[in-house]
Structures are given as C-alpha cells and as structure tokens.
Image (cartoon, helix red, strand yellow):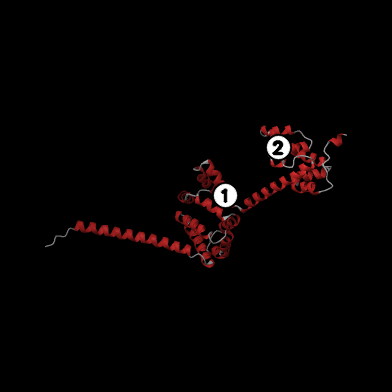
C-alpha cells in the first residue's frame, strides 16, 4: 500500500501555486508594458493620440496622480514630442474640453496645462523632466504637497552648477523668456554698433564700444563728464544709485554735446535705441562738444 505524505503534497502544491502566481504576474506586467509600448508606437494617427491623451486625463482625474500615472504621463509626453509640437498637443486637449467637462474634470487644471504647453519649448521641458525623481514627486503629490515645495526638494539635492542648469532649463523652456533674451541680445549688438558710429562722430576710437568698462570711460568723456565716477561701481548700493543718476545725466549731456535739446535728451534716456539711431543717421547732427559753449 502506497503511503501518502500529505505534508509533502501540500508543500508541492503551495510551490506550484506560487510559481503559477509569479508567472501570471510577470505575464501581466509584460502584457501591460507591451500594451503601453504598442500604444506609444502607434501614436501616428492624431485621432488616436487625442483619444489616448483624453483617456489619460480621465484616469488621472478619477484615480489621482499616482507614481505609475506620473511615469506614464512623462513617458507619453516624451514619445509625443518626437512627432508633435507642444501647440499641437495643446490643441488636441482643447478638442476634448467639452467631453472632459461632461466627465467632471476640473477645467481650471485643463486650461492651466494647455496654457503651459503653449508657452514652453518641448526640448527644454524634456531636459527638466529627465531630472525629476518620479518616486519622490508621486509621494509628495499624494500627500498634497505644493509645487513650490516639490521644486525646492528637486533642487535641494543638486550641486550649485546643477541648480543653475536646472533653473536655466526651466527659464529657457518658456517661449516668452527665450524671445526676450533674443531681443535683448539683438538690441545689445545693435546699440554697440550704433555707439561705434557715435564715438567716431565724437572723434574717439570706433572700436571702444567693444571693450567693457573702457566703453563707459569713453562715453563719459564724450559727455564732458569725469570717468572717475565709474569707481562708484566698487561702492555697493549707494554707489550704484549715484551711478544710475549719473547715467541719466549723461543722456542729457550727450544730447547737448550733439547740439540737441531737452526733449531729445529724454528720448535718449527712455528710447535709447531709436534716438541713438537718429544721432547716427542724421547728417545734420554734428558733435560740438563743450569747448565751443565755454568760448
């Protein structure tokens, strides 16, 4: 008669069940990853993309921003920006606004996302997203942390150089900031070229505007003012305030040096690029300096 070892059979069954559960779990995870991968790979049709974004927003609205959803959102955005611009993604969200509103999705959040996407550059934003610790952010969101505290924690563990790069990436991701920087650089170059002509008209070296500090020394001389005022740069706050006043006064002196009146001086102060252009291209405008006035 065969003896049945019940304990041994139970152990074998338990191990078998555990193996089956493990296989099912692995298979489920694999299927999910394949499904997500397939979903991302198939996002070439705008209608399908729009539906995917809509479904993700609805899921976040119903379940909250969990770690997996945050990772999926970042992953989806990264994949989408390989094919679509931020404006195109924002437009797809706007197309689903009515449906999302019917599903009780907070429109303030949707509008904020749309506005944000339209105002940032996708390449710079992806750089920022690559530096984010998904686990920490997800935990903080679930605990109701504010955006300010999240950003503080993100930058807290960075070195000084990394913090500067991170902030620059955020700033450069905004189209407005980027455009302002471009305008400022163009204006600086343009005004430098204008000063070359102004200095030449005033019988000074035309290359002087390209040399920092020295360009200000020459300008003060053209305006009949002492270059020693620049030493106030070494005096914090008070010296800087006095220098600002001197800078404004130099505009009036420059106008006088070219035979212009008070109105033109205000123009040099408030609309420098325009009135400096007039000084450069006006053939009637000559540098008279201050020696003739003394005579």
Check residue 214 in the rendering and tell me which mark sits there, or answer none: 2
- Left or right of 91? Residue 270 is right
Q: Please, what secondary structure does the residue beneath circle 1 have?
A: helix
**Which of the 4 quarters of the picture holds residue 260?**
top right
Instruction: Identify the residue at horizontal 52%, vertical 67% (top origin).
Output: 45
Distance from the alpha carbon under mark 1 to that under mark 2: 35 Å
Asked whether residue 159 appears in the rendered view, the answer is yes
**Which of the 4 quarters of the picture holds residue 101?**
bottom right
Instruction: Identify the residue at horizontal 34%, vertical 61% (top origin).
Output: 24
Quadrant position of the N terminus in the picture: bottom left
Q: Residue 82, image x and y in percent?
A: 53, 59
Task: Name the foreground residue: 61 vs 241.
Answer: 241
Location of mark 1 (residue): 170
- Pointer 1 with pointer 2, Cβ within 8 A: no
Q: Residue 241, image x and y in percent?
A: 70, 36
Image vertical order of residue 24 relative to residue 279, above or below: below
């Amino acid at each position: 008669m065969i003896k049945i070892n019940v304990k041994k059979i139970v152990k074998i069954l338990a191990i078998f069940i555990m193996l089956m559960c493990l296989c099912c779990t692995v298979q489920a995870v694999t299927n999910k990853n394949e499904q997500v991968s397939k979903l991302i790979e198939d996002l070439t049709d705008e209608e399908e993309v729009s539906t995917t974004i809509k479904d993700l927003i609805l899921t976040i609205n119903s379940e909250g921003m969990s770690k997996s959803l945050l990772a999926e959102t970042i992953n989806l955005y990264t994949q989408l920006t390989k094919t679509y611009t931020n404006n195109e993604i924002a437009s797809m969200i706007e197309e689903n606004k009515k449906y999302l509103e019917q599903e009780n999705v907070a429109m303030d959040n949707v509008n904020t996302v749309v506005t944000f996407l339209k105002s940032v550059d996708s390449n710079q934003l992806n750089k920022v997203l690559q530096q984010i610790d998904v686990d920490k952010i997800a935990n903080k969101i679930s605990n109701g942390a504010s955006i300010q505290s999240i950003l503080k924690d993100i930058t807290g563990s960075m070195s000084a150089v990394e913090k500067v790069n991170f902030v620059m990436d955020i700033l450069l991701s905004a189209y407005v900031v980027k455009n302002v920087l471009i305008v400022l650089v163009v204006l600086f170059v343009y005004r430098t070229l204008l000063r070359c002509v102004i200095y030449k008209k005033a019988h000074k070296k035309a290359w002087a505007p390209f040399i920092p500090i020295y360009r200000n020394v020459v300008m003060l001389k053209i305006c009949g003012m002492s270059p020693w005022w620049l030493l106030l740069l070494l005096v914090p706050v008070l010296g800087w305030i006095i220098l600002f006043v001197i800078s404004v006064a130099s505009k009036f002196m420059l106008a006088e040096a070219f035979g212009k009146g008070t109105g033109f001086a205000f123009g040099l102060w408030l609309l420098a690029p325009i009135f400096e252009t007039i000084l450069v291209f006006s053939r009637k405008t000559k540098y008279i300096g201050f020696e003739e006035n003394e005579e």
